[in-house]
Every structure is written in structure tokens, then in C-alpha cells.
Image (cartoon, helix red, strand yellow):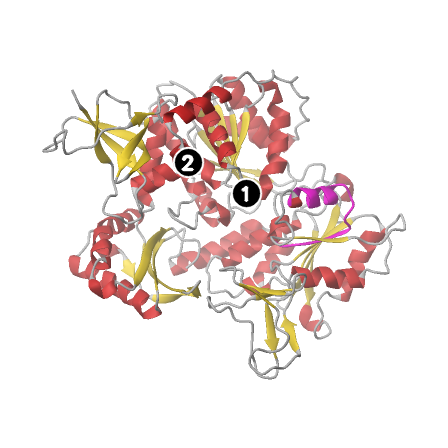
Amino acid sequence: MSHWLDIVVATPAHSSVAGPLTYASESPLAPGQLVRVPLGRREVLGVVWAERCDAGSLSAGQTKSVAAVLDGIDPLSDGWRGLIGFAAGYYQRSLGEVALAALPPQLRELGALQLARRLKRAAQAAPGPAPRPALPELSAQQQAVLEAFAKAHQPTLLFGATGSGKTEVYLRAAQEVLEAEPGAQVLVMVPEINLTPQLQSRLHERFAHLGEGQVVTLHSNLTPAQRLKAWLAAHSGQARVVLGTRMAVLASLPGLRLIVVDEEHDPSYKQQEGARYSARDLAIYRARLESQRLGTVQGTGAAAPCRVLLGSATPSLESWQACLKDRYLRLDMPDRIGAAQGDSGPQVRLLDMGQQPRGTLLAPALMQAIAERVACGEQSLIFLNRRGYAPVLACHDCGWKSQCAHCSAYRVFHKLDRSLRCHHCGYTDPVPRGCPDCGNVDIAPVGRGTEKLEEHLSELLADLRRPDGSPVRVARIDADSTRGKGALQSQLAQMHEGHTDVLVGTQMVTKGHDFRNITLVAAVNPDGSLFSSDFRAPERLFALLMQACGRAGRQASQSGRSQMWVQTLHPGHPLFASLKRHDYAGFAQDELRHRQAAGLPPFGHAALLRAEARTQEAAQEFLRAVAEAAVQAGLPGGQRVVLYPAVPMSLQRLANVERAQMLLESASRPALQQFLAAWQPLLAQVRAQAAHRGLIRWAIDVDPLSI
């Protein structure tokens, strides 16, 4: 007797095969079981989604059979499949694309025999648990927050100043969950990979008494074997604590009881390729789904609920508004650990660069302040969110600039290897001996990047000496200086051990790092985001500056004399006024008022349809055609959705591909979702027309980060 199964496999984006495929099996298989099935000429990994009562008109001869069952792995849970189904539907991607992307790549390649060997190695005895560590004493506000969170029945936003001890709250909340239920699991998420080592060390130290392998890490920098091992430990329940980046929100965690999203405001939580999901938003949904599955919403008391804790010193405006509407619980931690009562953090000083000598890179007053820190044996952090030596190399005779041949962007001048490098497509050339257009040898860098800033600081501080008489040490941390394996950890260690006096860096060093001896932070050129066309730019800038400010004065002994310097041409801007007061609430109130007047998120809902083609005309013509098709079809929800005209993207050409986009807005999220779901078949139909053969691809981005 054959059993008919709906099985999900990886399918290309926007293919006609978007849902499960039907396969035959000699024995019944539970939903969530991993199998290997034939697909075309290949054998691929699949997930059993459901057993069909009948296969309609299909016969055994018309249907392919399951090739192998990976019975060494327990079936994926109902909760996991519910999460995948929601993510695929909400973000308008195929079920198979999302489901298989959530599994470790090596699992898709291994056969049943190879997998059995891996599982046998993973089951080998691990070292026993270590002694339980001594716990640090909690502050009064940490204790109050933990007590309130223990009683919370809704998503909780921990609004804590940098240095207020949010990480210790995460650790204590996790500890309470793990001790309350033997099989409970905790997911801790961070926005970027470079933030995992520091938190991973603390998690291992805190939970070493649980035994080896109880804390695992999931992110894309792991080797395929490491990633598979960590995923299997999480799926089997062996790993009690999982630390990861945005991809970890889709991991299989059958005992999940707590999700912590650190730096919840960070844009890195939004996936920018494939299924463009928000890991923060999925964490909220997953916690609710798990709680419903456990029966806690109905009050059956079957198990403890799955709760979610969002943490940030500068929350996203969406989360802040949710707190104002009582959908989230907000818990405040305004005081730094060990700080004096009423100390709101480093003093913010604004330097009006319009009053400085022309061409000044670093104001004399700022240089004097840095020199004073060096003389005292203290450290300084100089923040410039632009790597390379200069953003453009230019000829002032004929006007030539270092334009990328493949993108509508300039190649950045890197002085160390004398190269011009596009930071979008990677196209690199040596610096020419003269202007390619007119031959002028006097081509010069325009603007400044972290390389130039590091060089300039080294020159200005060359005659200064540290307290021990040794020369000043200036270092740089950005994507270029940390390419080598272990380079970032090595440079951070140099900073923590006091071997570096002045650190120049991009946003990589402004968040999450606990530098204990920094008493001065300076933002060199933050004005670019003040008047950006991107409606989220002020929110991002304020968060970035507040996070950078939080790197200074993290020891109690530095309270009252740490400083944040901001070099700007617009010292009177309201954003800087809020920054000086450390007033996130005031900044959020102003921004939300502007957003509400414009109908922008969180008061409105948006999606982008992006098209890529060989010509800009082909991309825009496809967008115009699908908009017209939507109007003619009278799609459900269409009366409440506004479609704007197609326009080129801000980076119009990328790697020789022209890009355009169309904005959709609606005051109703359900109406927008209804419209998008009904629009999908039309998009595929229009794409198949001969008139649009020049189109390369299209994609829908729900809740886009920038418009």
C-alpha cells in the first residue's frame, strides 16, 4: 500500500512549483520528517509537510517515490513548520525556498549513511559539567526588571542605557528559564557576527555547569561541518542555549522558551537577499506561536510560555510605538552600572565645523582632548562610517572621477594597496599613473575614509608620548583591516589590553563592545544622514551616535568626565539637541509625529517590487506592465493599496544590471498582504510574456528598510 505525502523541496524563486510536491512512500511518515527524494535528475533533501488522504487522479506510476528517510533525525516540530509557513506567506516567497534555506547546507548534501556517521560522532560522550560560577550582584534596577519580566505575558522591550547591564539581565532571564524546566531552550540573537565572540564567552562561562555542548553558535561564518553540528545539537535539544545572528531565528528548537534579541533596532536583522525577512519580527511571531502550541494562551497551563525580550538603548520606532500602544511591555534601565545618581552618560560636545579653518579634518579642540586622554593613559575612539582612504579619486583639470565601470557608484581609493575598489560589486583596479582621460598626473583623493583618518592621526600625534614614554599607538578596525582569520579578535584584544591609544573605526566598533578604558568618542562626519531621502536615515544616525557614545565612560571611575564629540556643519539640528540630552524619548516623539503625518511605518505599511534587467527601460517597463495588470484585474485589497510609479533605485546600476523599483503603500497590513498574494500569479504571467524577455529577475520586499 502506498502512502501519498506532500513534501517540500527547494524550488527556484518565483517558479511555478511554489508549494509541496506529491511523492509516494511505502510506509507512513510523520510531518516534519526529513527525506531524500528525486527531483528531475537529482536527488534532493525534502521535508514531509503532510500526508494526503488521497492523491486525486495520480497513480503510483505517475508519482515518484521517496528515495530515503533520514530517520536518525527527529521530525521537525509543528511550531517550526508553522513559523516557516508564516514566513513564506508574509514575505511572499515559496514554501520550499524558505524551509530548505533554514536547514544547514551540509544536511542537504549528505546521504543517510554519511549522516548516520555524523550523528554517531555527535553522540560521543562529552566532558562533564564545570562548577557553577559565582554570580555578580545585581543592581536595584536589574532586579526590578527581572521581577517584572517574570510576570510579563507580552513581548517585552528592555530600554536600557549603554552600560546599564542589559547583558546580565539576559543571562539571568535565561538561567531562570533553564532551571525551571529541564528541556527548556533559550535563543539569544545578536545583529552581527563580530558581536558573537564576546557574548559567546560570557554564555560559556555562565552555563559551563550545564555540561559541554550546552551552548552552541549559529551564523554564516561557521564551516559547513560546524554549522551542521550546532544545528543538530539545537534540534535534538542537547544544546540548551543557542547564540546566533538573524538566521538563528529559523533554527529548529523544540524546547524553545525564551528568545532574546539584543540591539533589536539594528538593520542587520533584516535579510536583504532571498526571503527578505525581519528576524526581530519573526522572533515576536515565533514566541507567540510556541506559546499557543503549548496551550498557555488558552490557560491550560501545559507548560511555561515562550517569551521574547527585546533589548536596546535606542529601540526601533516600530517597537517604541508598540510600547506606547501597550502591545509590548517596556522596562526601563536608565542608569549605568556604578554611575552616580542622575548621570545620564558621557557629555556631548558639538563642534561647528563651519567655524574651523577650511579643510580641517579634525578640529584643534578635539585633537587637544585626544592628547589629554593619551597623557592620562586613557583611550579614544574616532568614528567615521566610511572605509578606504578617500571615497573618490578625481582629476581637477578635466573633471574625471573614479567611476565604477559596472555600477552607478564611485570606486574608493585604498592607499595601502594603491587600488581603486568598488564596495558594491568588488571591481578593483590599480591606481592609474595619470588621469585616464587627459593624462594629468596630479589626480588627488577627494573626501576622507578611515585609512586617511588613521594616517592623519598618526602624523598629528607622532611627537606625543604615553605615560610610560612609548610612542602613541593608533589602530584601525573596519572591513578592510579585519579580513584575515582572527584579525578582528586580535585587534579587539589589543584594545582591551591597553596596547592601543586611539582606535579609528566604522560602525563595526560602535556597538556591543565593552571597552573599559575609553573616555572619549568622536564622530567625524555624521551629517550625511541628516537630509537623506531615506525616511529611516535620522533614526539610524541617532541610534549609531547613541551607540558610539555608549562606548565611553563604562567604568564607574570615569563617570562625569567621559565625552562624546560630534563634528558637524549643523550644530543646531534637532537631532543633535536630543543627542546632547541623551533624550531618545524626545527624539522618538518628534520622529513618530513626522512619520504619522506622512503615513510612513509604523503608521502605514509598505512593500517594494524590485526589477532587474539589462536596461533601465526594460526594468521599468515590467513594473509598469504589472501595475497595469493589477489595476485591470481588480485584485482583492487593491482599493486600499497605493501603487506609485516605477523609479530607478538609488544605486541604479549594480554589476552591469539595471535596477528599478515600485512602492506599494497601505494603511492596512491585511489589505496589503491580500493584494500581494493575489498579485503573485499576475507577476509570473507578465514575466513570461515575450515583451519582457530582457528582465533578469524580480523580487518583493515586504516591510523594506529603505524606500
Q: Mark 2 packing: few (<14 Cα in 10 Å), some, or many (20+)? A: many
Q: Is residue 234 visible in this depiction of the protein?
A: yes
Residue 273, above or below 84: below
Give the residue pinned by disc 2: 250
The secondary element bearing badge 1 is classed as: loop
Amino acid type of the residue that numbered disc 1 sits on in the rendered structure: Glu
- Can residue 310 be found in the magenta stretch? no
Residue 54, percent from left and from top: 13, 28
The image quadrant of residue 295 is top left
Three-letter amino acid code of the residue under disc 2: Leu
- Separation of residues labelled 1 and 2 (CA atoms): 18 Å
Whole-percent x and y of residue 251? Answer: 43, 33
For label 1, the residue is 263
* Span shown in magenta: 488-506
Q: Is residue 275 left or right of residue 41?
A: right
Where is residue 697? Give x, y as percent: 32, 57
Frontmost residue, 113 versus 426: 113
Vertical placement of 367 versus 44: above or below? Answer: below
Viewed as shown, does residue 524 lie left or right of 662?
right
Asked if residue 492 lies in the magenta stretch, the reply is yes
Name the side, left or right, on which 1 lies relative to 447: left
For this rendering, which residue is in front, 676 or 435? 435
The quarter of the rendered structure image containing the C terminus is: bottom left
